[in-house]
Amino acid sequence: MGGFKNKNRKKAARKAAAGDMSAPRPDARDSQPRKAGYNASAAYDKALLKSDPMVAFYSSQGVFGHGLPSERDEARPLARRSYSTSPTPGERIEDRRRFLAHVVKPLNASFRVTANAPPEFYDAFSKRIAEFTGAPIELAVDLPDGSAGTTTVQPARALPFIARAYQLDVDRKTIRKHPSLDAFHKFLVLHTEIGDVTRQETVSMVPPACLDVRAEHAVLDMCAAPGSKTTQMLEVVSRVAPGSAEPAGFVVANDVDMRRACMLVHQCKRINSCALLVTNHPGQEFPMPSKYRNDGEGREGMFDRVLCDVPCTGDGTVRKNPTVFKTWCASQQINIHHLQVQIAMRGVRLCKVGGLVCYSTCSMSPYENEASVAALLRQCNGALEVVDVNTLEGNVLGKGFVGRPGMTAWRVFDDRFATVQHFTKGAGEEDDGKKTSEKKKEFKKAFLDKNRTNKGPPEYDDTEEGWTEEKHKEFREANNLFEYKSYDEVPSGIRGNMKPSVFPPTPEEVEKFNLHRCLRILPQDQDTGGFFVTVLRKLAPIGSVKKKPTAEQAAAHEAAAAAAAEEEAADSEDELANEGAGGQTVVNTQKLNAKNNQFKQNQQFVPCTEEMFKPIVDFYGIQAPDGRPYSRDQFFGRTETVKSISFLPRTLCDLMEADLSDKRRMKVVHSGLQVFDRNTKTKLNVGCDYRLSFEGIGMLKPYMTKRVIMFNKTDMSVSVKHSSAAPGAQIDNRQFSEPLQAQLKELGQGCFLAVAEDAKDRPWEKLLVVMWCNHMGLSSHALVYKTDLEGIESKLRAASLWEDVELNKELFDAKVKEHDEKKAENKKNMDERTKIEREAKAAEEAEKKDMAAYGPGGVKREGEATEEGVEGGAKKRSRKDDDPEDVITSA
């Protein structure tokens, strides 16, 4: 993407030079000098546009003042708080003022330390964070009057209701731009890239916390991208129980957009967990194998926990996305309501009986929140209930969390063209002759123009005398918001988008649904974004009972299974019979491809063959916890050539096996954890074609009995420091201690694992370095990215396992020079090969073009033949026929 970004920069520079003030601002992450008086809030306020329709909508809905805690004591748990049920107009107006004051401010940044970090590391990491916590920093800012000033901020403060989470008093732009926060910004960036920190909004941390995820659970995230909530749950299920070799639970992360699904994979890879499966499906169409459907005995579903963070209009994100103000309209909320219900309903079906479903949005609209929850409860007819999060055993939302109860009544306002025309066009009004499409365009343009110029003081009466229904109605209709009292009033042309479930529940349903147990999070309560969370428990199956197979069908199924077993046995006998003279097994590739065809069709992995896997096990001495060799059934390749090998836990293998037996299969984008990579130099004869992958070494290390070398503090520091200073350059082993030199000479050529000796008994995955020992053990180099090496150094320092050593300059410079010369030579050879390939391709294209332009004998297909074409055709014909006089030279 760098090329596109540079192109946009140049385009912006040309516009700025020409005086075009509409030129986009340069990328905020560019390495530009930081301005001492940079004020992100001031820049934000200038670009901010408020929305009168939005204010009119929520004022009439009763959102302001609803559920306002009567006791502003944030130290009390949620279950013990009392809420105002009938706020006064003064309380509503004050709440609206606080809301409008908060949404014009940039959203405060926040982050969370990963939950799977060991206690020893977290203690050391917390001390590092403490340097930025509770230590006020003076920032130079530009005051509204244009003069220079200062303000005091606290870069980080711990959140009392989310473990290991911190919220900042500044926004992300200020952190990137202000020189006083440069060290803190670099600290966050480094630990985010290596997976120690997840930069996540405060309200985004709430749904996984409410879901009560445990290590043994099967979890589904239906709309997972970009993946911050997914990683929060993945950290929990990735915990390995004592005595176990792999996680017992897993997370299936799904997204409808392939591009976002790939971004989700990148986000989750930082956790280095094998308990992840990424799929690409519309949420409402996520497949469920027949094995998990309603069996008529009270069992249904395949997941213990389901998170439905459904698509929404996102008006709760106005603090980080001010453009929501310009595009806000009530009809969008009504239109998306049906899709949200469909996705959530599918999530309920996929959930096991007794499991939990979390429904959440980043919207404040009751159409997308309470109305959707009520529609779910209505469709499930008693098989679903709203759960009070305070009653959950694993609930972490306690002291310090401010959430308001859900609404039980709301009003339906619509602002689409058909509604406005329905309410404003009189019975005897004459038609102006314009087409409906032209009227819609004019209506939309007027709507956007109004919102674009909607600045300055509010047009509503911000006093207690102005908080009346008459004033509200006048303000609403001035912004094209009209009310439908019931679904019977909705015109037939609108009913396709406006479903009856948008309207509030009846009094009987209100008593039964317990919508007050929902959680509403408003920006003014905790200086966050807006959010909505509801936890539901599945009490009984809701799908139709699957038909049991007849005796004939069962017999046919058993016969097919027996035939498949016989075919597999025959394949094994064929492989043994085709064993070559050199002890190499000749695999019948045709049968193997047919056997693994389902993985190709399903975008899943190709199982490892015994010939491929046995050398790996022997070379690295991989054994299971009970001492037996690892089963290859859990190792898969990504392609036919198997350039990399990934490990899948048994639970995910079982899920895939059940999926393969069904007609509608999951479209898998990513699964498991990469543990081996094929050696790039195929001529190396080291006894194994695969090297260790740093991504999965934390899981594989406990089961390696060979090629594991302990490095003392000095040797580990030399290795990391040298590899960080000169990535890719070899390390002269004379830089290491003599005992280590002897070990490396005895080890021989090939990949090995370097372990910090003082941390060998601690479960610190990131204190491991994958290295390669070169011929005769004279040199070695790290197979780790520079960012990961910086993370290892940071952890070694935190654990007091780092030593500031001085590298041997002569040996270091010699290896760097050798690396640079080799790199230059490789580049030269690559350029030459590229040039030859381009010339060959150009010649081939020219020949194709010539053959397409001229027919036999050099006759041009259209128009006269040129001398060159005639001559070329004559030469070709003469070579073919050996008779130049037979060449046709006339057109």
Image: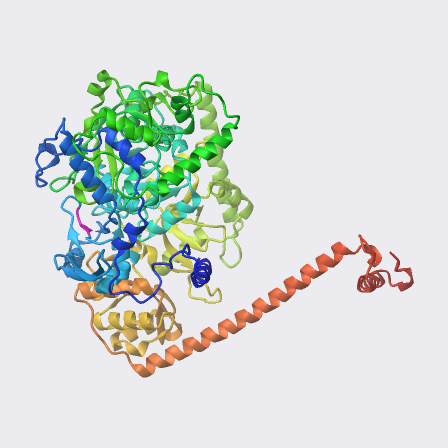
Q: Position of residue 881 (x, y in %)?
A: 86, 60
- Determine if the magenta segment contains residue 166: yes
As drawn, 170 above or below 659: below
Taking depth in this image into account, of 548 and 462 the one nearest to the observer is: 462
Q: Residue at x 34, y 24 (%)?
A: 294
Taking depth in this image into account, of 42 and 220 the one nearest to the observer is: 42
Q: Position of residue 22 (x, y in %)?
A: 41, 54
Q: Is residue 214 visible?
A: no
As drawn, 288 above or below 718: above
Looking at this view, name the residue that lies furthest to the right: 885
Taking depth in this image into account, of 795 and 730 the one nearest to the observer is: 795
Instruction: Determine whether, in the image, residue 127 is placed left or right of residue 366.
Output: left
Image: magenta residue range? 163-167
Taking depth in this image into account, of 80 and 121 the one nearest to the observer is: 80
Task: Tell me the quadrant of the picture where the N terminus can be found.
Answer: bottom left
- Determine if the magenta segment contains residue 305: no
